[in-house]
Image (cartoon, rainbow, N blue to C red):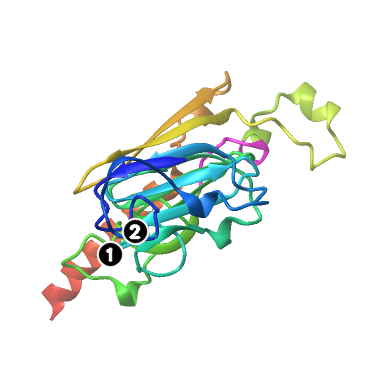
Amino acid sequence: MYTWGNNHNGQLGTSDQRRRLVPTVVTALRKAGNKHARIVDISCGGHHAACISSTGRVYAWGCNNHGQLGVGDRDDRATPIFIHKLRKTRIMQIGCGWRHTIVLTDEQQMFAFGMFNAVKHQYPRNMHDPDADNTQFETHIPLEVPFNRVNSSSSSSSLSSSSSKHNKGNANTIMPSLRSIQGISCTSSRTLSITTMLWQQKPGPVSLLRQPLLYRSMTVQTKEADNLLLDHKEHETG
């Protein structure tokens, strides 16, 4: 892998902060005998970058002011660092935005880190700030983005009577998911964390297909609206 350009945050991965005017090999990923050295995918954000090896490992480097490197802190890295929290998953695709990173696994799971929302997180009521956007927050480690696949649990109620009879006595019958993720990408925006997702939807009951893709995002925003109403009520009574 070769990099060049500005390097004030170590975003070239060359173990220093000197800019390069010509392509320079990233030696940290080219160590002798390193079976994870073959890079199959790479993405660049505002001032950071990340890549995937042929074995599914994820490395990140550069600016980390929002935790977008996913290593548990906010320190910049001038050398590619392995994201240890993703060691038990095989990553197939990665995307870097201005201040966030998102990955897609071989099991159709998405994980995000940096400045993001729609992940498995929620501010408790006692941490709610009425003067801030509580739907956006920083995570310094990868957190799952719950994608609504409309799976067996949600589709079981829509089975026909004949199917119900056929499956009688087998309450754990597994139905195929109606949605699948085909790809992800990020847009570098200074003010927004934008992720684009390509997904496929199979035919199914209209009531199921109308369900939101990222149901957690809707839950977080609904909770934020409820908290704002409580803030107004508390202010009026005070």
- Residues drawn in magenta: 146-154
In the image, is residue 182 above or below residue 129? above
Question: Which residue, as the protein is rendered here, is positioned at the far top?
Answer: 203
Quadrant (top left/top right/bottom left/bottom right) for the C terminus: bottom left
Residue 210: x %, y % from top left: 45, 29
* Label pair 2/1, CB-CB below 8 angstroms: yes
Type of amino acid under label 2: Lys
Figure disc tally: 2
Task: Examine the structure image and report whether residue 148 is included in the region drawn in magenta.
Answer: yes
Q: Secondary structure at mark 1?
A: helix
Residue at the disc numbered 1? 227
Say few, some or many: other residues with alpha carbon within 10 Å of mark 1 (under 14 / 14 to 19 / 20 or more): some
- What is the quadrant of residue 90 in the picture? top right
Task: Examine the structure image and report whether residue 114 is included in the region drawn in magenta.
Answer: no
Residue 118: x %, y % from top left: 40, 50
Residue at the spot 63% in from the left edge and 36% down from the top edge: 151
Q: Which mark is residue 223?
A: 2
- What is the quadrant of residue 109 in the picture? top right
Type of amino acid under label 1: Asn
Residue 122: x %, y % from top left: 40, 63
In this rendered view, identify the residue nearer to me: 82 or 25: 25
Residue at the spot 28% in from the left edge and 51% down from the top edge: 47
Q: Secondary structure at mark 2?
A: helix
